Image (spheres, helix red, strand yellow):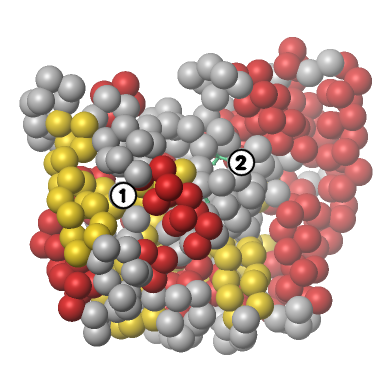
């Protein structure tokens, strides 16, 4: 069955492990949004591998991976990952395993510099998003501004590329001092020929490529990055990423919608909540609503290794939030869920699950609040579920936790991850 896989929370749900599992039965693994702000940690034979841009499905030798035009691609990071995978004997010739859509926008050194400068200028204010600093926002911004440079532009004469680069960077001239500005420009031009050489054999028209493989009855896995709550339109705006993370985005960011319309949509969620960066998390364990929860959070962070795979930042920890999860299921078109990392909570006497949002005046919220100001004032209503020893269906308490989730959000839990190793995955 062809699948679109999405994060159903604020990212870092353990998607890499599910992708790894599902790509055993996929011929093509496709990324359609985001960039190297993602970070998928995979454990294969006890060895940790972190990928940021290349789909995690690459670790299965029979797959071909496509980076669709909805992605923003930092060529230096891309080449670094290729080198790392070659060193690990994952493949020798990258172009035999990886294809890149020619319309994909590039993240250039100036995008990264802009991201970092903006964030450090906004520190301590409401405008501070806590981005990954990888230039993601600025790259999508220049795409919408219609000044962006794309993979296909690398194949123009250098003088034409430079002309486009000047037109792009000129929009932001005032943000940099003259020395920094010309340095960022020359850094880019220095690498153009190198990027071209690496990318040339991988470049494809994604629609033609997908249509051909669809006609050949190949099996597809669309690998989403980040999570629904970080979606630019439907997430906790403005504390979101700059791409669309819901299922319809797959038909735009790797454009053969005939294929994506018939996919099953699988949402990945943890048994608890994490978030990196700023923005409200109603069930965050801050000691506001439940005594002793700060210590619980510390413990989960330590046991679950809850530190950003891209930036190393400690992740914020929260109780399971079924109101947010139900919203994610509805807004992203999720058909089934995978619940991950319940093993981290094993041995706790009980666990809290948020089943309702209230306003400070006690009134019930009948929808997921659209304004972050409202979301940050939410008073969560919790129910307790009894703790479990083992985080799979063999444990009665864990099974009832999963059933509670299913009943509340209205879709089945099809996969259960109960440990970091490849085989620690139950299919229900
Ligand atoms: P950006 O995507 O780097 O612009 O960051 C915007 C927000 O999305 C920040 O809060 C980041 O921490 C968050 N974010 C981006 N990518 C990921 C991810 O892969 N996992 C979790 N959070 C992410």
Q: Which residue is nearer to you in this view: 357 or 202?
A: 357
Q: In this orientation, which residue lies closer to the viewer: 34 or 203?
A: 34
The C terminus sits in image quarter: bottom left
Whether residue 86 appears in this view of the structure is: yes
At 24% from the left edge and 30% from the top edge, which residue is drawn?
Answer: 378
Q: Position of residue 170 (x, y in %)?
A: 74, 20
The residue under the point 24% across, 80% down is 395
- Label 2 CA crowd tier, 10 Å (few <14, some 14–19, many 20+): many
Image check: 253 left or right of 251?
right
Residue 173 figure quarter: top right
In the rendered view, tell whether residue 71 sits above or below residue 183. below
Residue at the image position 26 percent from the left and 48 percent from the top: 321
Of 310 and 73, nearer the camera is 310
Q: Is residue 274 above or below residue 278?
A: below
User: How would you rate the neighbour count of disc 1 (Cα within 10 Å): few for under 14, some for 14-19, many for 20 or more?
Assistant: many
Asked which secondary structure carries label 1, the reply is loop
Residue with the mark numbered 2 = 132
Q: Secondary structure at mark 2?
A: loop
| Quarter containing the N terminus | bottom left
Which callout, 1 or 2, points to the residue nearer the camera? 1
Report if the beta carbon of the residue with label 2 is closer than 8 angstroms to ligand 1. yes
In the rendered view, would you say 267 is above or below 92? above
Which sits earlier in the primary sequence, circle 1 or circle 2? 2
x then y, percent, for residue 299: 46, 55
Q: For residue 279, which quarter of the picture? A: top left
Q: CA distance from mark 1 to mark 2?
A: 24 Å
Query: Which residue, given by chain and number where applicable, does mark 1 sit on?
Result: 319
């Amino acid at each position: 069955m062809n699948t679109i896989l999405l994060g159903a929370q604020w990212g870092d749900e353990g998607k890499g492990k599910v992708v790894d599992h599902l790509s055993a039965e996929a011929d093509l693994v496709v990324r359609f949004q985001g960039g190297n702000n993602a970070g998928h940690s995979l454990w294969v034979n006890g060895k940790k591998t972190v990928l940021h841009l290349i789909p995690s499905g690459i670790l299965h030798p029979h797959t071909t991976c496509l980076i669709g035009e909805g992605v923003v691609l930092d060529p230096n990071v891309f080449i670094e990952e290729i080198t790392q995978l070659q060193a690990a004997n994952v493949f020798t010739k990258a172009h035999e395993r990886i294809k890149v859509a020619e319309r994909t926008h590039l993240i250039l050194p100036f995008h990264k510099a802009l991201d970092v400068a903006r964030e450090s200028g906004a520190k301590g204010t409401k405008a501070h998003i806590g981005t990954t600093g990888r230039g993601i926002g600025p790259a999508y911004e220049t795409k919408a501004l219609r000044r962006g440079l794309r993979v296909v532009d690398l194949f123009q004469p250098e003088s034409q590329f430079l002309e486009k680069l000047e037109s792009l960077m000129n929009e932001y001239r005032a943000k940099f001092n003259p020395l920094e500005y010309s340095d960022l420009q020359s850094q880019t031009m220095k690498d153009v020929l190198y990027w071209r050489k690496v990318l040339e054999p991988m470049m494809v028209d994604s629609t033609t490529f997908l249509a051909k493989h669809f006609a050949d009855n190949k099996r597809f896995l669309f690998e989403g990055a980040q999570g629904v709550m970080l979606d630019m339109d439907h997430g906790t705006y403005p504390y979101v990423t700059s791409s669309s993370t819901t299922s319809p985005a797959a038909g735009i960011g790797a454009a053969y919608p005939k294929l994506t319309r018939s996919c099953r949509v699988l949402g990945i969620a943890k048994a608890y909540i994490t978030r990196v960066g700023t923005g409200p998390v109603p069930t965050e364990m801050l000691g506001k609503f439940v005594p002793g929860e700060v210590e619980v959070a510390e413990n989960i962070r330590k046991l679950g290794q809850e530190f950003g795979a891209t930036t190393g930042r400690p992740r914020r920890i929260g109780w399971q939030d079924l109101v947010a999860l139900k919203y994610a299921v509805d807004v992203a078109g999720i058909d089934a869920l995978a619940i991950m990392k319940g093993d981290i909570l094993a041995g706790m006497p009980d666990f809290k699950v948020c089943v309702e949002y209230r306003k400070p005046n006690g009134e019930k919220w009948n929808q997921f609040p659209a304004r972050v100001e409202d979301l940050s004032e939410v008073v969560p209503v919790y129910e307790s579920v009894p703790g479990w020893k083992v985080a799979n269906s063999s444990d009665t308490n864990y099974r009832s936790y999963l059933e509670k989730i299913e009943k509340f959000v209205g879709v089945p839990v099809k996969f259960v991850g109960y440990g970091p190793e490849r085989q620690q995955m139950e299919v229900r």
